[in-house]
Image: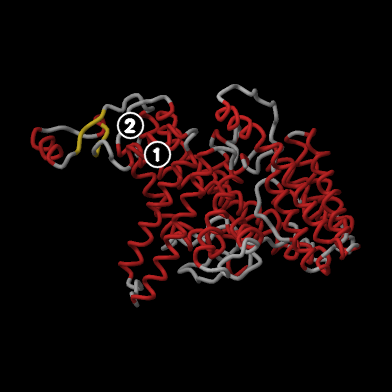
Amino acid sequence: MLFSSWNFMVYFLPATVAVFYLIPSHRQAARKTWLILASFFFYGYWKVEYVPLLMASIVANYAVAEGIIRSPRHSRVILIAGVSLNLLLLGYFKYTNFAVHFLSHIAQRDLGHFNIILPLAISFFTFTQISYLVDVSRDRRLHYRFFDYTLFVVLFPHLIAGPIVRHWEIMPQFVARELKASRDNFGVGIALFLFGLFKKYLADLAALYADNVYNGAVQNAPLSTFDAWIGTVAFAVQIYFDFSAYSDMAIGLARMFGVKFPSNFDSPYRAASVIVFWERWHRTLTRFLREYVYFSLGGNRLGHARQTLNIMATMLLSGLWHGAGWTYIIWGGLHGTFIVINHQWRLWAARMKWSFDHWICRGASVVFTFFVVSLAWTFFRATNLAVAGKMLFNMLALGGVSVPDQFFSHGAFRDKFLAALGVHFIDTRALDIKHYDNAFETIAALLFICWALPNTQQLLGKYEPILEPVTRQPWFHLKLGFAVGLVFGFLAYLILRNSYISEPSPFIYFNF
């Protein structure tokens, strides 16, 4: 049941909200029980067979937390056993076939393939519970009742694809009886949800161009430099709007029930360095990796060489977490390399007392950061290394700069001029041309939204839609009211009347 599907928006969400709001505010246990039942139904709607797995994971991890509390002398052993159990479960479902294929390649013989279906959201609820166990082992006062713990894990807005919430942010809201049904909470929640719905529409629009190019690369269709960059930038825009859409919808849905989530995106494509990019992209995953992997490995406390090793290990694990494939591992390794170089550049610039505060320098840094991030996205999107190699070959113009023949008019002078510049034409009619109408203009407009307009949290900053305050004040604040409600209603109508709602596309991060 996708957030953007009719079943969710017309049936599940109204029923869940209505029952929640009808339960008296002093009946907090009843409200929590209702949310737990609704969340299990939401998860079971995808594949009911995996509901027992989710329930068993919750019970087992809570039992481990209890063991940490009750046996302080053996808490470290219990913690290691609990984390190992979680990782083994995740490894079995997500990485078994990857390991078998790798061993088949090493042994040069077919070792077979296991028919293992990846349970939905296993990566997210596993990371959520690992962070709980680690935090309880560090501070036993953070342990909560099983009832609240269950609601924390299964609460349906974040269960499938995040944000990866921390228990000490969310469960105190349950304990403090803050599940309040109010007009303000509902208004801010529905505004966030509609923002997310609109972003999902933009993501699906960008997907037309990205899928067209990458599917053409899979089919070995001729690609020009222009095609390769349009496809990759389209994917960069698609994955941002897609996951940012889910995050906004999740934050909005939680707010409808009086729960505040942390933000997950903060205009990442405006980042002037890869380090800042990761501070703004999928922020809750970055936070998890920093606090539970990077710091555990020693962080930057053991010298530059060890810091470099820790960064690379953390980012390689990030790539492997996203998918069981070499393309994801290379993507993580590239970002690790970018971050290491970024750190070294900062040290060198500080030593040389260089300043890059001028708006031209900052603009150039933003463009360059987007350039290297887009190069890495090629591996994230490509189905295999051959496709990634073909895309990069064309993007970097290693065979010369090329443009689609059918999109440019010809003339003797123009052809000679372009030939002198090393530009040549390629017939790319094997691609689906109808999906290329206004491609450049559409992608440019979507990039303008990413680079120039306030993000959702900034627009609604005065209503405190997230746990942390908005740090950068935008040039425009949105004031919710009747007029804005009409605009949102008309916007929702325009989106819902599109045919894709009848068969909504899944969110990209559902695959992880």
* Whether residue 491 is visible: yes
Asked if residue 407 lies left or right of residue 492, the reply is left
Rendering coords of residue 508 (x, y %): 57, 41
Which residue occupies 66% across, 51% down? Answer: 162
Asked if residue 293 lies left or right of residue 78, the reply is left
Residue indicated by mark 2: 223
- The kind of residue tagged 1 is Gly
Rendering coords of residue 24 (x, y %): 87, 60
> Considering only order in the chain, which callout, 1 or 2, is on the residue closer to the N terminus?
2
Q: Nearer the viewer, residue 221 or 20?
A: 221
Q: Is residue 121 above or below residue 148?
A: above
Q: Going by the picture, which residue comes out furthest to the left?
A: 413
Which residue occupies 67% across, 34% down? Answer: 96
Residue indicated by mark 1: 231
Asked if residue 131 lies left or right of residue 483, the reply is right
Which residue occupies 77% across, 49% down? Answer: 154
According to the image, what is the colour scheme of the structure? secondary structure
Q: Nearer the viewer, residue 427 or 474?
A: 427
